[in-house]
Amino acid sequence: MTRADAISRAREDFKSGAFLTELDRRVAYRTESQNPSRGAELRGYLEQEMVPAFAALDFTSRIVESPSGKAPFLLAEHHESETAPTVLIYGHGDVVDGMEGEWRDGRDPWRTTVAGTRLYGRGTADNKGQHSINMAALRAVRDARGGKLGFNAKFIVEMGEEIGSPDLGKVCDLNRDALKADLFMASDGPRLSADRPTLFLGCRGGIRIHLDVNLRDGGHHSGNWGGVLANPATILVNAISTLVDGHGRLQLDALKPPRLTNQIRSYLADVQVVPTEDEPALAENWGEEGLSAAERLYAWNTLEVLAMSSGNIDKPANAIPGHANAVLQLRFVVGTRVDGLVDAVRAHLVEKGFPMVEVRAAQSFAASRTDFDSPWIKWAANSVQETTGKPPAVLPNFGGSLPNDVFSEILGLPTIWVPHSYPGCSQHAPNEHILLPLTEEALTIMAGLFWDLGELPRPLT
């Protein structure tokens, strides 16, 4: 059997409907990790769906309980050779709220529905569809090789990614030996675009910054007191403008990343950020000057105002409010110094005349990515191009967040993500979906990657 045969088997799995039937069954599990009443569904997805699926692939698997008592994990392993490469694969079976009643045309989020080239259902894009593609590709390669993969494979499935993966790091740390591998390769998040295969090497980090101005209890009549009482809302918006200006450009050096290297610029030179018709248009004259859209999105830091509050926006009173609050988020790339960031923001605001603005941080996660010099990057890019005939976009990091640091820092693995969704997939919203042509291509990409991994006599170094 050949590489072409493995890819053909993956494509036939899609065309026959077998893969879509499998995915429909998995979407039916209402694995909303943010819903405390879904504990049985979270466990059931692993015990009733994943354990048999891995057994059919000749994996041994076990359930690992969460150290904090939250959602469990599944660890699965297939071992063939002491010298062959070992890949660690990740997926998460939990989803966000189903949002029943909000889906277009009355669709049920817990069943897959085909409409044109789209397959709707909660978890189709994030992440049941993506790890199901990878498992189906393993099956295609195993069948093509007569019951062998040609490499060693390990899989970890968590059920708490949508609540911030609170125990993933602890579980991986406690199971270092069981998770030892040569390469981490998984799928989550969107591609650069629907028609361009993509590899990304890590994730931006994030930190929420809360700004509060509390001047007095209650409001005071704006006619009687306007002009003589300080307005906390006015103070707050002007304080924010000293951090990020009206064009989204960072004003404080402590918020900025290191200077872009020529190596990063070269990787992003041919990357175009082009929204589709149902995605928002890029804003003109927005973001850091002198950078391309790809560099702003994948290689730079951004400070976004997520929410603001002062007074009652639905029933505004003719009164000067007593307090104002805002939540900002800094998305940052590897190399950004975030230790002491809150102190730097606080000192900056004092210097700018805003000592009354209280500053605190919450909900932070780390930035991480694979070294650009890793031989696994070129190997993966060559494999994807051989399968699709298209050079993949190689991004330094995903624009959003994933627990990549657990695998790159705690386990010390080179990390490569191969996403099977696209930016307009409506993940975390009503009408979540995957694209059928993209799904078929993704199955062939992963079958090619897994076949090529089995062709390596030993791990790349």
Image (cartoon, grey):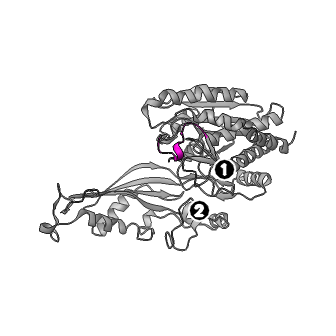
Could you say where residue 203 lies in the image, as x and y percent from the top left? 56, 52
Residue 86: quadrant of the picture:
top right
Residue at x-position 79% and y-position 42% = 451
Question: Which residue is label 1 attached to?
Answer: 117
Could you say where residue 401 lies in the image, as x and y percent from the top left? 52, 50
Residue at x-position 49% and y-position 59% = 336
Question: Which residue is label 2 attached to?
Answer: 275
Q: Secondary structure at mark 1?
A: loop
**Is residue 107 located in the magenta-colored stretch of the structure?**
yes
76 horizontally vs 234: left or right: right
Residue 383 or residue 12, whichever sits in front: 12
Q: Secondary structure at mark 2?
A: loop
**Is residue 87 located in the magenta-colored stretch of the structure?**
no
Residue 354: quadrant of the picture:
bottom left
Marks 2 and 1, Cα distance to the nearest angstrom? 18 Å
Badge 1 density bin: few <14, some 14–19, many ≥20, Cα 10 Å? few
Quarter of the picture holding the N terminus = top right
Eye-nearest disc, 2 or 1: 1
Could you say where residue 118 lies in the image, as x and y percent from the top left? 63, 48
245 horizontally vs 82: left or right: left
- Specify which label sits upstream in the sequence, 2 or 1: 1
Q: Callout 1, which amino acid?
A: Thr
Residue at x-position 17% and y-position 55% = 218
Q: Callout 2, which amino acid?
A: Pro
Badge 2 density bin: few <14, some 14–19, many ≥20, Cα 10 Å? some
Q: Main secondary structure of the magenta part?
A: loop
Could you say where residue 273 lies in the image, as x and y percent from the top left? 60, 64
Above or below, 96 against 297 in this view is above
Above or below, 394 against 92 in this view is below
Residue 258 or residue 45, whichever sits in front: 45
